[in-house]
């Protein structure tokens, strides 16, 4: 659980608590069921309940680090404090880890990363908006993200079962939207709720 490793004071989303209570460990059970024909269809189904704010900053995706972290570039603006490349941690979601120097691969970690990559491929535009706190203890920028077509990426991850809802106050502007999306995924047994 990322929030425990970082030592941040956190109020965990109901989904994460439920997942831990049920002992959601390694992958098992049924194959990941795909209720829609494509990632684009999944991502745009019922996940645009929050529009990007008028002052959202337009930046370029350099790459997806993992399901909830992006490397972006752009000029200084509403989210980026200065021009250049910056790591951005998506608010209100925690995706399963991918294998790396600081983490062991978790169930659906690669799939969550692939989902975010499909939504935000390298070279694409993403719109970012901040909440109250703008950085974490790793100096990553904290933000909400939207595709140019209006898909609320944070919500899409939860709605498709590729992320748990996690609240790190005071960054909670869209907590109801993300926890509702997680609830829909849990009821439909999508992603981590049906495969892990």
Image (cartoon, helix red, strand yellow):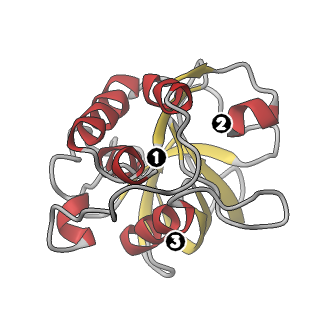
Left or right: where 163 falls relative to 6: left
Query: Whole-percent x and y of residue 112?
Result: 47, 61
Instruction: State the residue in front, 133 or 165.
Output: 165
Left or right, residue 50 beside residue 138: left
- Between the C-alphas of marks 1 and 2, the distance is 21 Å
Whether residue 24 is situated above or below residue 192 in the rendered picture: above
> Which of the two labelled residues, at mark 1 and mark 3, occupies the earlier sequence position?
3
Q: Secondary structure at mark 2?
A: loop
Please tell me which residue is depicted at 26% across the width and 60% down the height of the picture.
43
Q: Nearer the viewer, residue 75 or 176?
A: 176
**Can see residue 171?**
yes
Q: Nearer the viewer, residue 108 or 26?
A: 26
The image's mark for residue 60 is 3
Residue farthest to the front, as pictured: 29
**Which residue is the site of mark 2?**
134
Contact, mark 1 vs mark 3 (Cβ under 8 Å): no
Label disc, if present, on residue 163 of the rendered structure:
1
- Quick check: 3 left or right of 21? right
């Amino acid at each position: 659980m990322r929030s425990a490793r970082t030592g941040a004071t956190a109020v965990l989303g109901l989904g994460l608590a439920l997942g831990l209570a049920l002992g959601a460990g390694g992958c098992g059970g049924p194959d990941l069921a795909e209720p829609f024909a494509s990632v684009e269809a999944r991502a745009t189904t019922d996940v645009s309940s929050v529009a990007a704010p008028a002052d959202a900053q337009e930046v370029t995706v350099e790459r997806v680090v993992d399901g909830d972290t992006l490397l972006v570039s752009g000029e200084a603006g509403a989210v980026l404090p200065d021009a250049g490349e910056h790591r951005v941690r998506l608010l209100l979601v925690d995706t399963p880890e991918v294998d790396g120097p600081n983490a062991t691969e978790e169930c659906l970690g690669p799939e969550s990363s692939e989902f975010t990559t499909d939504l935000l491929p390298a070279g694409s535009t993403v719109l970012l908006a901040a909440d109250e706190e703008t950085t974490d203890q790793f100096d990553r920028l904290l933000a909400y993200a939207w595709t140019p077509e209006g898909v609320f990426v944070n919500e899409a991850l939860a709605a498709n079962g590729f992320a748990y809802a996690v609240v790190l106050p005071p960054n909670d502007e869209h907590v109801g939207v993300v926890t509702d999306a997680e609830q829909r995924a849990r009821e439909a047994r999508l992603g981590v709720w049906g495969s892990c």
